[in-house]
């Protein structure tokens, strides 16, 4: 059992008084190993809130460096971090929030070959990547290694989030859907414009990334109902949330 120190008991007091979390749930958070893909717009709030929540080990995958144009939305990075790797900058911010967190850096780009071995080292994976190649590689690796995946994506003023556990069965006895059931194949090259080309409202990834952190906490502690088989959609301009149910395609 992972023992909480007196300092940690005080730090996480507002968690511990929640009957749904309690000391046992906080210990689960402390034991948890969580891998976050990307330390950008989505990764920033994910890492900040999971660190504050007391997740024991956070792995960060990112091979990019901090630039001035990142700072409008990637709030984990300071102006003084421009030119640093995002992984190093994020680690500095995480340890400033909570020095009890162990941070493991993976300054690399995930692909179909290296993703499975890395994913297998963690309990839960959160995808904050911005390209379809990485998303499919991460999703396939999580399915193969039986690791829950909290996936999200954002547009200019909208975002979506879901939880993938295709290695388990649902209440109906059928296998849970996978990422490829939701998105059978990537869109044609050039169809979805990049963030740099289309733009993005700075606060939007804060909303979606925080929701990802919440789903991860639910998965780790075993509370609530994760977004398995459900795609949560957020329209920032209309201030509206919608949920779409989806299931495993026939023949899979």
Image (cartoon, grey):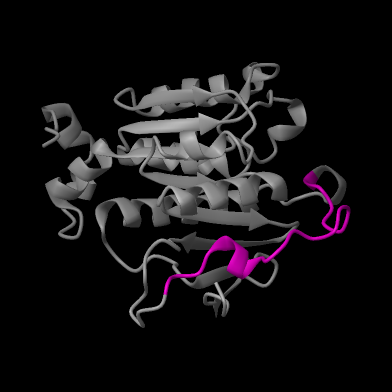
**Closer to the camera in the image, 116 or 20:** 116
User: Residue furthest toward the bottom?
Assistant: 172
Q: Is residue 125 above or below residue 63?
A: below
Percent x, y of residue 141? 52, 47
- Please report the residue visible at 59 percent of the width from the left and 37 percent of the height from the top: 38
Residue 102 horizontal/vertical position (percent): 35, 24
The answer to whether residue 39 shows anywhere in this view is yes
Instruction: Report the magenta residues as a range.
Output: 175-195
Find residue 152 and report its image quarter.
bottom right
Seen from the viewer's position, the closer of residues 86 and 14 is: 86
Residue furthest to the front: 251
Residue 131 visible within the image:
no
Residue positioned 29% across, 25% down in the render: 100
**Would you say residue 131 sits in the magenta stretch?**
no
Q: Is residue 235 left or right of residue 242?
A: right
Q: Main secondary structure of the magenta part?
A: loop
| Quarter in which the N terminus is drawn | top left
Question: In the displayed structure, would residue 201 be above or below residue 173?
Answer: above
Instruction: Find residue 55 and report its image quarter.
Output: top left
How far across and down, in percent of the image, does residue 139 sit? 55, 52
């Amino acid at each position: 059992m992972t023992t909480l120190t007196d300092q940690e008991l005080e730090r996480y007091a507002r968690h511990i008084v929640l009957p749904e979390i309690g000391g046992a749930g906080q210990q689960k958070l402390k034991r948890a190993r969580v891998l976050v893909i990307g330390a950008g717009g989505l990764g920033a709030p994910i890492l900040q809130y999971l660190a504050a929540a007391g997740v024991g080990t956070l792995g960060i995958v990112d091979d990019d460096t901090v630039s001035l144009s990142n700072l409008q939305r990637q709030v984990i990075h300071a102006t003084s971090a421009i030119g640093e790797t995002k992984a190093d900058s994020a680690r500095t911010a995480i340890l400033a929030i909570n020095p009890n967190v162990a941070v493991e850096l993976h300054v690399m780009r995930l692909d179909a070959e290296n993703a499975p071995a890395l994913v297998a080292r963690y309990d839960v994976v959160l995808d904050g990547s911005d390209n379809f190649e990485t998303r499919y590689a991460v999703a396939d690796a999580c399915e193969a290694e039986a690791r829950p995946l909290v996936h999200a994506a954002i547009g200019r003023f909208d975002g979506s989030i879901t939880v993938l556990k295709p290695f388990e069965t649902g209440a109906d006895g059928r296998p849970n859907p996978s990422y490829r059931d939701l998105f059978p194949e990537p869109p044609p090259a050039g169809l979805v414009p990049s963030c740099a080309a289309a733009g993005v409202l700075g606060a939007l990834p804060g909303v979606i990334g925080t929701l990802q952190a919440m789903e991860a906490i639910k998965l780790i502690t075993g509370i609530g109902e994760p977004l398995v088989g459900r795609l949560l959609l957020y329209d920032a301009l209309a201030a509206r949330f919608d949920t779409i149910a989806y299931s495993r395609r026939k023949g899979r």
